[in-house]
Amino acid sequence: MSRGQRIRTFLIGLITIIGAIFLIRYRSFAYELILFVLAIGFMCTGINLLLYYIFMAKNMVDGKVIFYKGIILFNFGVMSSSITNVPKIYILLYLAVIHAFSGLIEILRAKEAKSYGAKSWRLKMIHGLVNIMMAAFCIIFVKHQNTAIYIYCIGLIYSGLMRIGSAFRRTTFMFIR
């Protein structure tokens, strides 16, 4: 990672943490803002994958997988933008499913990295377990009003700390100048 990438990663992590603290402090409109951010994030990622499929991955091996991922993520974004008026229990379950799925994928990636002998498998495993714990907290505290806000903000703080940590981690690649 170059010096500019390290600075950018550090700043994104810091902005993420500040945004999470802002959402915790101003809980009155945080619920709608969280849904808006989730919807925009899913839709942008879905559109990005669809454009990648159209211009690059159409003739690649497993190119259709990228196409299907793009459609599914775009649909998640549309669904996220349309559920602002439903009870908050559904949002918590939605957030729990996202965290559980993400945690499961990360644990599987950690097992794969361990089988290849990579040194970063422990960090991936911890990341996956934290996501599974977040999903469990969503289900356990489903009756509380602000649980979705707190769970989302804890996830943002954790993500920001991981970004800051990766900005200071040594890379194993050699740079030629």
Image (cartoon, rainbow, N blue to C red):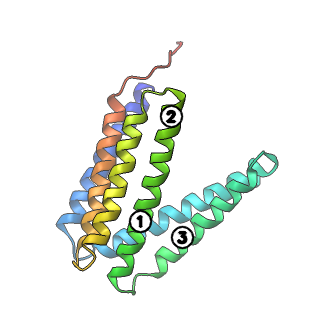
Identify the residue at horizontal 50%, vertical 46% (top origin): 108
Residue 96 horizontal/vertical position (percent)? 38, 67
The residue beneath circle 1 is 37
Identify the residue at horizontal 39%, vertical 42% (top origin): 125
The residue beneath circle 2 is 113
**Mark closer to the chain start, 1 or 2:** 1
Q: Secondary structure at mark 1?
A: helix
Q: Is residue 141 left or right of residue 113?
A: left
- Which one is nearer the viewer's eye here, 164 or 64? 64
Q: Secondary structure at mark 2?
A: helix
Q: Is residue 147 above or below residue 48?
A: below
Camera-side mark, 2 or 3? 2
Residue 159 horizontal/vertical position (percent)? 34, 48
Residue at the right extreme, as displayed: 59
Identify the residue at horizontal 27%, vertical 69% (top origin): 149
Q: Is residue 121 left or right of residue 21?
A: right
Q: The disc labelled 1 sits on which kind of residue?
A: Val
Residue at the top extreme, as displayed: 177
Residue 109 horizontal/vertical position (percent)? 50, 43
Q: The disc labelled 3 sits on which kind of residue?
A: Phe
Verify CB contact (< 8 Å) between mark 2 and mark 3: no
Task: Quadrant for the N terminus, please.
Answer: top left
Camera-side mark, 1 or 2? 2
Camera-side mark, 3 or 1? 3
- Which one is nearer the viewer's eye here, 116 or 161? 116
**Mark closer to the chain start, 2 or 3:** 3
